[in-house]
Amino acid sequence: MKSPNFSAPSAELDSRVARFGLRVAASLTEHSNALPHDVSERLRFAREQAVARASQARAAAGAAVSTSPGVALMGSTLALNGGPRSGADGGGLWTLLLSALPLLLLAAGLLLMQQGQVNEQIAAAAEVDTALLSDSLPPSAFTDPGFAEFLRDAEE
């Protein structure tokens, strides 16, 4: 069984909805001539009020989308709305600090990892030096100029 694709409305569905709306509007227009005058005036007044409320709701929804965090429909996808960027209450500063927190934690983690690697390299070098210095060396090794230089570099 093929699953329906809900990611984007199909053009066929849009055309069917448009045709249905046109048929309903034509039918209402055709039968509106048979209505008494007082009923048609009440309907006209109600229609004007509905249009005014709809325009106010659209204006309020547009303002709400631009000033409050939430979910916005962008084409066929949903996106999170970031909300206000600044305010008199200092909310922008807290938002900035909280958004920088993951970056600071990442930098601290990287510094700790680097310090751990440096400590491992020091421990490995110390192990090699200990192995070299604890071996029994022939007396001629102590007179070798390269060995003396090695000991001077190790002291620094």
Image: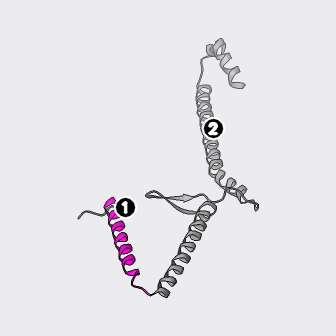
Q: Which residues are magenta?
A: 9-35
Q: Is residue 14 magenta?
A: yes
Apparent side of residue 104 relative to residue 47 in the rendered image (left or right) = right
Q: Quadrant of the N terminus?
A: bottom left
Residue for badge 2: 119
Residue at point 59%, 25% (across, down): 132
How many marks can you see?
A: 2
Q: Name the foreground residue: 17 vs 109.
A: 17
**Which element type, helix, strand or loop, lies under badge 1?**
loop
Q: Residue 48 location in percent, x, y?
A: 54, 75
Amino acid type, mark 1? Pro
Residue at point 71%, 20% (across, down): 152
**Which element type, helix, strand or loop, lies under badge 2?**
helix
Residue lying furthest left in this view? Answer: 1
Residue at point 30%, 63% (across, down): 4
Residue for badge 1: 9
Q: Name the foreground residue: 98 vs 86.
A: 86
Locate residue 149: give its quadrant: top right
Amino acid type, mark 2? Asn
**Does residue 124 lie above or below 100 as drawn?**
above
